[in-house]
Amino acid sequence: MASKASSEAPAPGFSVPVPALPKLGRTWYTRGALYWLCRIRTAVFFLLVIAMLGFFSLSLYSGFRDILPSTARAVWDGVQVVASCVTFVWGWVTQRRGHREALLDPPSPGETYRAKRDHSRRAPGLVALGRGLVILAAPVMPAFAAYVAGWLISWVAVREYPSEVGARRWMEEHHAAP
């Protein structure tokens, strides 16, 4: 019989194995180099997503902007700059509040996987719906992109994800004295 891998064995002082979390695996428990590589990979991915969204938004907005008269362009550009700054902060604050609430009642490992599965099932339908709405949103796409950028940067910059807190609490609940 093969021995258990160290990541599948119960953590010292615990009678249950360390649960794996989506995108982090079991690295969240020790928070070693592999954990930080996973976090950096996520941050770089979202940085690329933000860059592509920004490019797309500005390209779409410039197509809308070209149909405006020159005096209206200057005013509308100023409005977009102010709106983008406000929505960036709004996205940041919204995510931080949501994160704080999620830390108060963090999901268990099972709930984390169910949420990930449900999100994966809903995403294709939301993408199809978004394609039609994005054309209507051309005049405000830079502000929308700023909101998303603020939300994503805030999400990536947290010290600890709610799923990690939930997994730690789950392990404490299932701890049995040896």
Image (spheres, grey):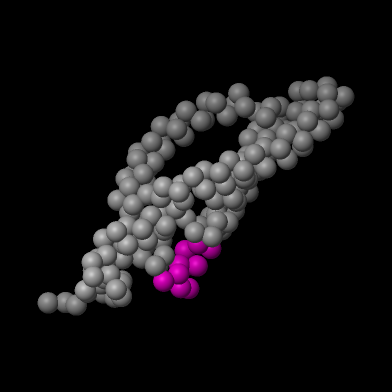
Residue 118 left/right relative to 157? left
With 115 as the anchor, is 78 left or right in this view?
Answer: right
Residue 130 position, x and y percent, is 51, 30
Task: Classify 115 as above or below 170.
Answer: above
Looking at the image, can residue 113 be seen?
A: no
**Farthest residue, direction front:** 177
Q: Position of residue 97 (x, y in %)?
A: 56, 44
Give the residue at the far left of this rendering: 1
Placement of the N terminus among the 4 image quadrants? bottom left
Q: Is residue 32 magenta?
A: yes
Quarter occupied by residue 144? top right
Say which of 93 and 122 sits in front. 93
What count of labels does the image hold? Answer: 0
Q: Residue at x 78, y 30 (%)?
A: 79
Let me know if residue 30 appears in the view: yes
Instruction: Find residue 16 and report its horizontal and vertical position in percent.
Output: 25, 66
First to last magenta residue range: 30-41
Q: In the rendered view, would you say 128 is above or below 95? A: above
**Residue occupying the point 58% across, 41% down:** 94
Which residue lies at the image location 35% right of the left edge and 40% below the top edge?
A: 118
Kindly identify the residue that appears in the image at 42 percent across and 38 percent down.
Answer: 123
What secondary structure predominates along the stretch shown in magenta? helix
Indicate left or right for 156 with 59 as reference. left
Q: Verify whether residue 125 appears in magenta.
A: no
- Quarter the C terminus occupies: bottom left
Q: Where residue 24 sits in the image (x, y, percent)?
A: 41, 61
